[in-house]
Amino acid sequence: MDESFVVGLKRDEMLRRRRTVRRVRMIGGGFTLLLSALGLGLSISLTIRMGDLWIAGVLMIASMLFLFGSSLVPFLQWGKLKRWYAGTDLPPYALRMTAAALELGVEGAPAPVVLPWSAVVGFRRKRKLGQPLLQVVVQPGVTAGLGRRGGLYSVASLDQPVEAIDQALRYFSNGVAAVAR
């Protein structure tokens, strides 16, 4: 018998989080764009008023142009992120534990990332922007191929409580892996 423990994803919660990420990026980008436009306007105004010290004003304008240009990045990435979300379905599950390994469903990955228990320390509880998260912790020197956001799961999007995940980790890893408090 192939015994396993599967932690699924709450689809509605994951889609809500995707919308929140897009909205926060747009609000942050808009705020930065507004501030950089104000800074650019002020630096142009000061350059005109400086008279003989116009070279310092040109330096201010150049720095504000750089800030203004970089504040456009979230707007350019918004379309790319929207297309990626539309073309990338959620993984079938967040975690799957068997006696042999821990399998991690990673958004955008063609297949789950499989980590043998010898490579896994467990999960660390952390908070980001007030949201409780579980982060996979691997042994030093192990490159898990998780990518930038792989191995980081919002507790609210998991269909199993953290206590059940901890018990399953301890059981399937023979006590080697656990959820750190």
Image (spheres, grey):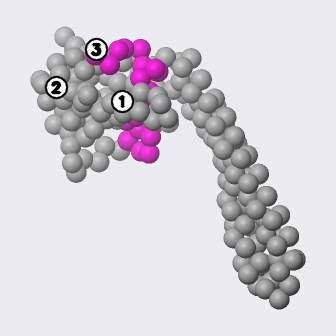
Numbered mark located on residue 12 in the image: none
| The magenta segment | 146-164
| Amino acid identity at mark 2 | Ser
Quick one: SS at disc 1? strand
- The residue tagged 1 is 134
- Residue sitting nearer the eye, 4 or 168: 168
Mark 2 is surrounded, within 10 Å at the Cα level, by few (under 14), some (14 to 19) or many (20 or more) other residues, namely many
Q: Residue at x 74, y 67 (%)?
A: 65
| Amino acid identity at mark 3 | Ala
Lower position in the chain sequence, tag 3 or tag 1: 1
In percent of width and height, residue 165 lies at 29, 19
Q: Quadrant of residue 47?
A: bottom right
Q: Quadrant of residue 118?
A: top left
- The residue tagged 2 is 173
163 horizontally vs 93: left or right: left
Numbered mark located on residue 164 in the image: 3
Q: Residue at x 24, y 30 (%)?
A: 180
Lower position in the chain sequence, tag 1 or tag 2: 1
Mark 3 touches mark 1? (CB < 8 Å): no
Res. 148 visible in picture? yes
110 horizontally vs 174: left or right: right
- Residue 151 falls within the magenta-colored stretch: yes
Quick one: SS at disc 2? loop
Viewer-side label of 3, 2: 3
- Residue 156 falls within the magenta-colored stretch: yes
Image quadrant occupied by the C terminus: top left
Mark 3 is surrounded, within 10 Å at the Cα level, by few (under 14), some (14 to 19) or many (20 or more) other residues, namely few
Q: Residue at x 35, y 24 (%)?
A: 95
Res. 114 visible in picture? no
Lower position in the chain sequence, tag 3 or tag 2: 3
